[in-house]
Image (cartoon, coloured by chain):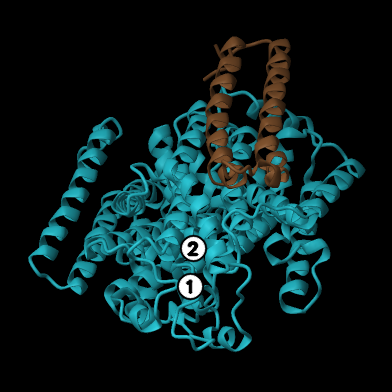
Chain colours: A cyan, B brown
Amino acid sequence: MLKLEGGFIQNLGRVYGLYTLGFLGFVILMAILEAAGVPNTIIGWLFVAFTVVIYALIGVLSRTMDSGQYYVAGREVPAVFNGMATAADWMSGASFIAMAGGIYLKGYPYMAFLVGWTGGYVLVASLIAPFLRKFGCYTVPDFIGTRYGGNLARLCAVIILVVASFTYVTAQITGTGIVASRALQIPFELGVWIGLAGILFCSMLGGMRAVTWTQVAQYIVLIIAYLIPVFWMSNKLGYGLIPHFAQFDAVSRVQELEALHGVKALMPTAEAQAEAGSLAALKVGINDASSTPMAKWKFYTLVLCMMAGTASLPHVLMRYFTTASVKAARQSVGYSLLFICLLYLTAPALATFTKLSLLDPNVATSIIGKSVSEVSNLEWIQKWSSVNFLKIIDSNGDGLVQINEFFMKGDIVVLATPEMAGLPYVISGLVAAGGLAAAMSTADGLLLAIANALSHDLYYKIIDPKADTKTRLIVARVLLLVVGAAGAFVASMGLTSILGAVAWAFCFANSGLFFPLVLGVWWKRANRAGAIAGMVGGFLAGTIYLYQVQFNGMTPWLGLDGLRFGMIGMPVSLILMIVVSLMTEEPDAETQKMVEEIRVPSGKSVVE
Amino acid sequence: MSKSSSGDRELHWQKTKTLTYVTLIIWYFFSFEIHLWGDALNTAGFPGAYYMAGQGSQVAFALLVFWFASRQDKIDHEHGLAE
């Protein structure tokens, strides 16, 4: 591939087309092996090993010692491929493994995540990304540092970036560990370190360039792995050819079944819930839209926090630094959203069909209302009970499974669907490979964002501005290793549950960075003192509030819980930034000229 | 093409701002406004709230970004400020 470099960008379509065919061929080969009697564990191993080796190979082939290649992939990534890479960068283990389960267990209020995690891209496209692309920076703190001037502003941005991205990356490494340990049948802690090794192989030698091309490969695997089982299930169980259209009739049917099985009326008993621990029974309706002002407010604020977080998370924004032009950066946001929607539009359909499969007495796979002994003998029930992903507790002792007696982890909606619907094991292997791709690709992007900010902004710009390129790139790699190891260490301690930490990352980012980024482009009057006040004030206010609510037992104000602490951080950041900017001198003429420059696509970039 | 008068830049920025406001109004509608009416969207025949949160808003966002990108590109070209 390196030899072809001159023609590589021109041949991307062909290269990834062949790759996709090759992957599908591999899936078919696995299906043949399964039919030939090869045991499931070996097929699981092959799926994980094959895909990870491919990613690592791409990573090694993309090695580079050029700083432009290392930090921004040479700014030559076409809009469509950058869209795929961003989609993989964006869709984490949480999106892939946990999202459909969240919709299943928590119903309509959870769908605020779907709205927030897609609509945020409108802000990225219209307010931030194209301007940062024109600016020509390597990292997000690079923009803050140059626009506002001075090492302190840069340092504040670096700190917020590290806190937000590190919170996020531990969740991803945890996700990698879960999938690797399940597919390879090894202990979780070992899975974490193996996952990290794969992640570092993809990113260490080639930086952004390597991460870009592995993320495209990972996107292809994850989207195939997500869509095939859902289409298969929708057709096999006779719900319709295209699940995205068929799901709405299914919603009405699920509502009938909810009445039949007493969802919302039958709550789990306290003893059963205590025994089930973190596993949950279905307690909400599928389509109970917010009807009280409080429910509406909670939906509204979650959407807002996730959107502003999307537009301020550095690992997302830095993907748009790699396009060839400002125009391509804008289009690329559209493609990113398109590729993300392929999965996000499928998640509700998956959740709804899973509900039908489990609840509808007319469907062979249903379990609710059947006898406990019959259900307990099902192979998938036994398998997932043994790893404590689900539990049946016959609390009323009538020998039947009621809705309030079936406890599960949301993750099984994605992980166990193939077995639930009676699909061959090869599909389970495929899903494991997809989950791994999703978690690895996001972890790659996050680790790189952290290490690049530390090496470029902290080391090169602040500590040793005279460092030569070679030293800088060596420092970047050492930092990548250190940050990765720290993330894996935290993950292996099992300190984070996947989604809690992910939502925190969004609020850390929007509390500290959203307004300094947006106003840096849209308000010429914004100055250094204002930006620093906005970053420090917003970030501290949000963090202190999170601490009080999450760890100190404070009653949340207006229902703003730990998922929504950006609602405290953001207003503080905005107000401080405006007030302090207006109280201090306006930025010098040179800075104002710079802001005018980034508002037009033509002409040279500001830095470099 | 890259040389242009400051008056042209002024107008370019005005139009850019207008486009951004329009984009943000549409964004606001599909992000927040529509979901405030979630319970009213649910009718006997169709789960409107579920539809908007699970599909409608997302499709609207994707179309909106592509539309925004093409409009902005047109504005850049009109004023000779495209790359």
Q: Which residue lies furthest to the right in this view?
A: A583
Please tell me which residue lies in front, A269 or A409: A269
Q: Is mark 1 on a helix, strand or loop?
A: loop
Q: In which quarter of the image is residue A74?
A: top left
Relative to A186, say whether A594 is above or below: above
Q: What element carries label 2?
A: helix
| Disc 2: which residue | A101
What amino acid type is highlighted by mark number 2?
Gly
Side (left or right) of A220 relative to A43: right
Marks 2 and 1 in Cβ contact (< 8 Å): yes
Side (left or right) of B64 relative to A242: right
Residue A151 in view of the camera: no
Q: Quadrant of residue A441?
A: bottom left
Q: Looking at the image, tell me whether mark 2 or mark 1 is earlier in sequence order.
A: 2
Please provide percent x and percent y for residue A444.
43, 58
Q: Residues within 10 Å of mark 2 (few under 14, many from 20)?
A: many
Q: Mark number for residue A239?
A: none
Query: What residue sits 16% from the left and 53% below the top?
Result: A28
Q: Quadrant of the N terminus of chain A?
A: top left
Please tell me which residue lies in front, B12 or A548: A548
Relative to A493, say whether B62 is above or below: above
Residue A491 in view of the camera: yes
Query: What residue sits 32% from the left and 47% below the top?
Result: A220
